[in-house]
């Protein structure tokens, strides 16, 4: 099938709108939609994972009362539901990011994607590292280091260095792969957060 | 909702909804599995001047899969209200923690799949681009796995407290 598709695609390349002399605007619209769709997929998965982990829903739904409250609300009558709020916030944010992606140069977009993905790993990793340092290594009262804003400093510096040295060609080649890497890593992160409360209980 | 509940009993309404959710799930499962198998099938041999085509027109399912996936996610989100109060609480009380955890993960898996739908639709647009052959294949497989996972976990949750349980 793969070969069949390849053969079909090989032929269809010559039959593409560009080859047929379709208006440049049609081709550009298609390319822009591609940029939008791929960026949306990457940004949505990344932001959904972040919002879930930080528990930042746009709204909270209380199923027993049928109430919808803005932001994160504590348990009232019955359990609160945050899932809808995470999805809507992630979708809205990803929509903005994806629209912005269609107007910036492709090279910047690839680098920005590397930056965001690296930051999503390094920021929480820095915070975890600082917490380990505070508990196991610090010989002074290092509680002030236990802050996401302090962890942001090494996180951003590390990310900037990685992005600067990341080969542009590799960023170009990897770009569509983020579409699968980010959701899979996101699911690993979200799944591991479920281990303690449910699977190892 | 009150108008509906004045015509049929509340639990009957939710069971009908759950059954429709199940029927759509079977359809989605069939379509996305066929498409995933089509993109994963080993290459066929060319015979003479004939290019041997797959019996499964994989690209033809794309719009159907995307639409049913969204419909299913919306229906699931609606039924989730009932699940959260009527099913999950007794599930926790009876210590079915694996089922609760698996269902929590199902929410995330389905959400990730939803986020991929615009790109999935783009990659399957005709004429298929050879440049996106690999990513098209794995996005399709990801969606198929997400639907399978959601179906199995949803079925287990239904067996706990749902249609026919």
Image (cartoon, coloured by chain):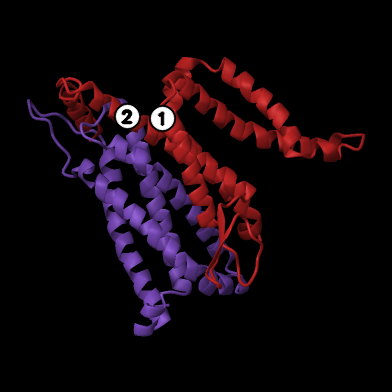
Q: Are marks 2 and 1 on the same chain?
A: no
Colour-to-chain, red = A
Quarter residue B46 falls in: top left
Could you give the CA–CA distance between mark 2 and mark 1, rounded to whole angstroms? 8 Å
Q: Residue at x 43, y 37 (%)?
A: A40
- Give coordinates of residue A168: x percent, y percent: 48, 16
Q: Can residue B32 be seen in this view?
A: no
Q: Is residue B140 left or right of residue A78?
A: left
How packed is label 1: few (under 14 Cα within 10 Å), some, or many (20 or more)?
A: many
Residue at 49% x, 55% y: name it: B107
Q: Mark 2 lies on which chain?
A: B
Of B143 and A147, nearer the camera is A147
Residue at numbered disc 1:
A176
Q: Mark 2 points at which residue?
A: B132
Residue for point 51% across, 60% down:
B103
Task: Please tell me whether mark 2 sits on a helix, a strand or a loop.
Answer: helix
Give residue A96's position: percent from left, percent from top.
47, 37
| Extreme residue in the left direction | B49
Q: Is residue B91 above or below residue A132?
A: below
Please tell me which residue lies in front, A125 or A78. Answer: A78
Relative depth, front residue between A175 and A90: A90
User: In the rendered image, which quarter contains the C terminus of chain A?
Assistant: bottom right
Rendering colour (chain B):
purple
Judge the density around disc 2: few (<14), some (14-19), many (≥20) Cα neighbours within 10 Å: few
| View extreme (right): residue | A140
Q: Numbered disc 1: what chain?
A: A
Mark 1: secondary structure: helix
């Amino acid at each position: 099938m793969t070969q069949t598709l390849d053969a079909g695609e090989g032929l269809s390349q010559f039959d593409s709108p560009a080859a047929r002399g379709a208006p440049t605007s049609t081709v550009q619209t298609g390319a822009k939609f591609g940029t939008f769709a791929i960026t949306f997929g990457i940004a949505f998965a990344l932001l959904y994972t972040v919002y879930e982990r930080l528990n930042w829903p746009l709204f909270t739904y209380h199923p027993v009362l049928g109430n919808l409250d803005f932001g994160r609300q504590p348990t009232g009558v019955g359990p609160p539901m945050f899932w809808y709020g995470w999805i809507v916030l992630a979708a809205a944010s990803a929509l903005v990011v994806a629209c912005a992606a269609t107007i910036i140069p492709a090279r910047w977009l690839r680098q920005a994607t590397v930056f965001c993905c690296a930051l999503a790993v390094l920021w929480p990793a820095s915070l975890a590292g600082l917490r380990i340092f505070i508990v196991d290594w610090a010989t002074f009262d290092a509680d002030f280091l236990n802050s996401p804003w302090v962890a942001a400093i090494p996180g951003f510096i590390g990310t900037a260095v990685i992005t600067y040295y990341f080969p542009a060609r590799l960023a170009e080649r990897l770009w569509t792969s983020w579409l699968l890497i980010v959701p899979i890593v996101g699911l690993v992160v979200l799944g591991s957060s479920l281990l303690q409360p449910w699977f190892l209980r | 909702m009150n108008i509906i509940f004045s015509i049929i009993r509340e639990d009957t309404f939710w069971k009908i909804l759950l059954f429709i959710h199940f029927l759509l799930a079977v359809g989605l499962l069939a379509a996305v599995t066929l498409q995933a198998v089509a993109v994963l099938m080993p290459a066929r041999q060319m015979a003479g001047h004939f290019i041997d085509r797959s019996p499964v027109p994989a690209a033809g399912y794309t719009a159907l899969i995307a639409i049913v996936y969204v419909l299913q996610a919306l229906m699931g989100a609606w039924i989730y209200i009932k699940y959260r109060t009527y099913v999950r609480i007794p599930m926790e009380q009876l210590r079915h923690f694996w089922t609760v955890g698996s269902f929590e993960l199902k929410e995330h898996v389905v959400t990730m799949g939803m986020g991929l739908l615009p790109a999935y639709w783009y990659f399957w647009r005709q004429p298929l681009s050879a440049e996106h052959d690999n990513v098209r294949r794995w996005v399709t497989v990801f969606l198929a796995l997400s639907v399978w996972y959601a179906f199995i976990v949803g079925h287990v949750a239904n067996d706990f407290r749902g249609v026919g349980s």
